[in-house]
Amino acid sequence: MALPLLDSMVPAMASPNRSGSKTPSRMVFVYVPNGIVMPDWVPDEEGIAYRMKRIMAPMEPLREHLLVLSGLTHNGGRALGDGPGDHARAAASFLTGCHPRKTAGADIKIGVSVDQVAAQRIGGQTRFASLELGLEDGRLVGSCDSGYSCAYSNNLAWRSENTPLPPEINPRLVFERLFGGGDEVEDAASRARRVKQQSSILDSVREQTQSIQSSLGPTDKRKLDEYLDSVREIEKRIERTERDSAGMAPPMAKPGGVPPDYSEHSRLIFDLMVVALRMDATRVITFMMAREGSTRAYREIGVSDAHHPLTHHRGNEEMVEKVRQINTYHVQQFAYFVNKLRETQDGDGSLLDHSMVVYGSGLADGNRHTHHDLPVILAGRSNGAVKPGRHVKHPAETPMANLFVAMLDRMGVPVESLGDSNGNLGYLSDLG
């Protein structure tokens, strides 16, 4: 079982300022589908004195850690002669900056995504080159959007131009992958016996952790205790979900370990992401908060209508208001994650200090299916390589792929181009 970064792991003669260059940077991408009500998202002001509007407002306590970016475009999400299919193109182009081949067959084609460019270069330094996570199951075959393969709508990560990496939505399987014996997960029978005996997966490493703790100083002991407590707390929540799901009639369609409540599901995955980054199991994560074109209803916030049809509101204010509520609800979940990163110590700073976290959608206005002036937040400082606390408005039609080129450069993975990029996005660490 991997450990978080402890003070005792740092060489005694190391410079006290070494973390700026030695603590690893992390890269996370969080995707929301179906666009956003942009008049309630884009700040009117630029610079540090911008006012957060309604949808972004849950991030207000974290504004000093956020770089709000506007003006970015994914031209690959547009039709470009291929007709309808904006949702499939939105997800497919989001991390690739490419236009997908329109097909519902096996001859899918898109570019390599930014996360996988990083994973292929630095993934060997961690147990997992990358993690692909989500909250909504989706198939990979057949047509999901006007003749576009479901593989486009349901995936963010592309290892090659025709190889998607499907997201895992089951917190139990993510947990066992992180804390089990490698990529293999605990079989159902073994898990059932352990749960019946009320034992924790941490019991298997109890002697080792006790041995380690005896050699640690007070600060490291506290860090290790907090880390183990957080792992056990996640494990308990997963077990509670499994018990609750087993008692429901008729049986849930979702796999065991998947909470019926969206907020609990998202926060379990977010907590697992924090732990994975904290123990340096991976430095690259993608997370789909729902698949593109999602028809999920959000009854827990009083919205029983399906999300995607609501976005085709044609100006109907009642429908627009429900989309606002969904958009704000998604941001609330993201704020939870960013705050967790901010509160988690990592070297001489926090996980957030050493990360770049993108939040956004491949569509801006979901009603008109626009792919320009996309909603984008970049959270974190990437070891001082990003200067947040501002709203930066870039010139119209600036490729979003320029942001990814800049992020890769800050991860120590320089590339000449990605997708339709035409340069390295400026103003991430200066005021211009």
Image: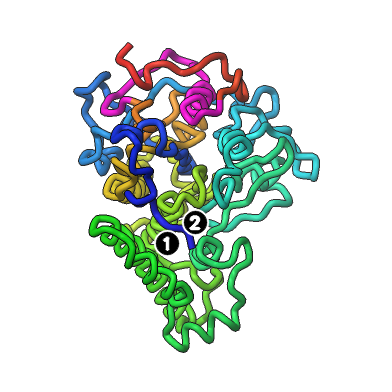
Q: Which mark is residue 135?
A: 2
Q: Residue at the location (45% across, 84% down)? A: 247
> Is residue 138 covered in magenta?
no
Is 296 rendered above or below residue 424? below
Residue 21 falls left or right of residue 399: left
- Identified by mark 2, the residue type is Leu
Q: Residue at the location (69% across, 23% down)? A: 81
Whole-percent x, y for residue 267 in the image: 38, 58
Q: Number of callouts in the render?
A: 2
- Identified by mark 1, the residue type is His
Cα distance, mark 1 to mark 2? 7 Å
At mark 1, the secondary structure is helix
Can the viewer see residue 298?
A: no
Instruction: Determine contact: label 1, label 2, CB under 8 Å.
Output: yes
Q: Which mark is residue 265?
A: 1
Whole-percent x, y for residue 344 in the image: 30, 50
> Is residue 389 covered in magenta?
yes
Q: In this picture, which residue range is highlighted in magenta?
A: 387-413
Whole-percent x, y for residue 432 in the image: 33, 11
